[in-house]
Amino acid sequence: MKKAKLLKIYVGEATKHNGKNVVQLIIKIFREYKIAGVTVSRGIMGYGADGIIHGTKLLELSADLPVIIEAIDTAENIEKVIPRVLEVVPKGLCFTVDVDVHFYGSKTK
């Protein structure tokens, strides 16, 4: 078992920074910093600090659905990337959690 840190970011999928999609910017930052693992998940409904409910409706073609970006790596690597992430997230939620990694990678070589 190894100690690690999980960074979670909640934003809207349509959130922009300088005209660019924040989710895509964050993924590029994580790749640049060689973060060990990253997953982006789209929520079906949610709300944040503004209290506005975001979700899909049957005939709605586009919605600003909630997105959760999770990144996991050593505490040192996560701490290095946080300032860059915060530069591009105009609103949302960003937090870290200490985690125990029991398995990472392939069991077969």
Image: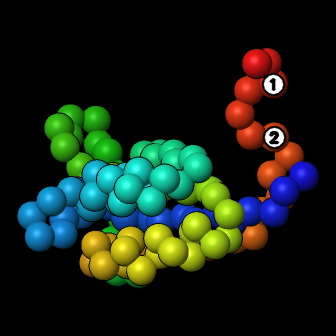
Residue 63 seen anywhere in this rendered image of the structure: yes
Q: Seen in the image, is 37 located left or right of residue 55?
A: right
- Asked which quadrant contains residue 60, the reply is top left
Q: Position of residue 109 (x, y in %)?
A: 76, 18
Spot the residue most to the left: 19
Dot 2, how many residues are within 10 Å of its Cα: few (below 14), some (14-19), or many (20+)? few
**31 and 10: which is toward the camera:** 31
Residue 20 lies, with reference to residue 90, above or below; the image says above
Residue 33 lies, with reference to residue 51, above or below; the image says above
The answer to whether mark 2 and mark 1 are in CB contact below 8 A is yes
Q: Position of residue 70 (x, y in %)?
A: 54, 55
Q: At 32% from the left edge and 73% from the top edge, which residue is drawn? A: 89
Residue 54 seen anywhere in this rendered image of the structure: no
Spot the residue most to the top: 108
Q: Seen in the image, is 53 located left or right of residue 7?
A: left
**64 and 77: which is toward the camera:** 77
Name the image colouring: rainbow
Badge 2 marks a residue whose secondary structure is loop
**75 and 60: which is toward the camera:** 75
- Asked which quadrant contains residue 87, the reply is bottom left
The residue tagged 1 is 107
Q: Position of residue 66 (x, y in %)?
A: 39, 56
Q: CA distance from mark 2 to mark 1?
A: 9 Å
Q: Amino acid at mark 2?
A: Phe
Residue 18 lies, with reference to residue 14, above or below; the image says below
**In the image, which disc is placed on residue 103?**
2
Residue 15 lies, with reference to residue 83, above or below; the image says above
Q: At 28% from the left edge and 52% from the top edge, which residue is drawn? A: 24
